[in-house]
Image (cartoon, rainbow, N blue to C red):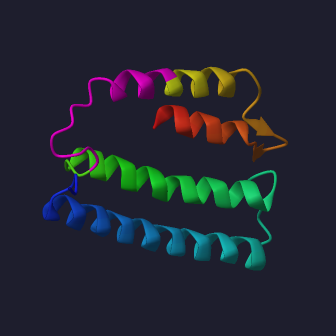
Amino acid sequence: MNPYDEYQKLLRYKYGFHSFLIVVVLSAFNFSMSSIWSIQWAETKEAEYLFLLSIAVFYSFIMSIYKGAYFHKNETPALIIPLFLLSSLLYLVTSLSSPLLSEGKLTMRGLNLLFGIM
């Protein structure tokens, strides 16, 4: 038995496609910033792309949850919400324990802050 109905699947595909477009546009913008203007806004290139990918993933998660396509049709999120809150508090505590900026560039601790906020 499939836990998602057709409308939920359609919404998940729709927001997945939107996330893909976000990744493409942000990657192209980041590539042009680094190649044309020689701007690096994070400590490493890997950190830059992780930040950009996390933006697209967050968009997909938030829109899927908001439109009702994240949980199964008969599932109650009463157990899942406390686990999300606990993990977000853990991410927030670890991100605030060290500096988010180093020499004017974002560190990997900033990614923990983004996960905690999401």
Q: Quadrant of residue 118?
A: top left
- Figure check: 4 above or below 100: below
Residue 81: say if magenta.
Answer: yes
* Residue range (magenta): 70-86
When asked about the image quadrant of residue 96, the answer is: top right
Pinpoint residue 84: horizontal percent, then vertical percent: 43, 29
Residue 17: image location, x then y, percent? 37, 72
Which residue appears at 65% of the width and 55% of the height? 50
Q: Is residue 72 visible?
A: yes
Answer left or right for 46 relative to 66: right
The mark tally for this picture is 0
Q: Height in image: 17 above or below 98? A: below
Instruction: Pick whichever, 61 or 39, lies toward us.
Output: 61
Q: Is residue 6 above or below residue 59?
A: below
Q: Residue at x 26, y 44 (%)?
A: 71
Instruction: Residue 25: say if magenta.
Output: no
Q: Quadrant of the N terminus?
A: bottom left
Residue 40, image quadrant:
bottom right
| Percent of width and height locating residue 53 | 57, 59
Residue 41 at least partly seen: no
Residue at x 75%, y 59% (from the top left corner):
46
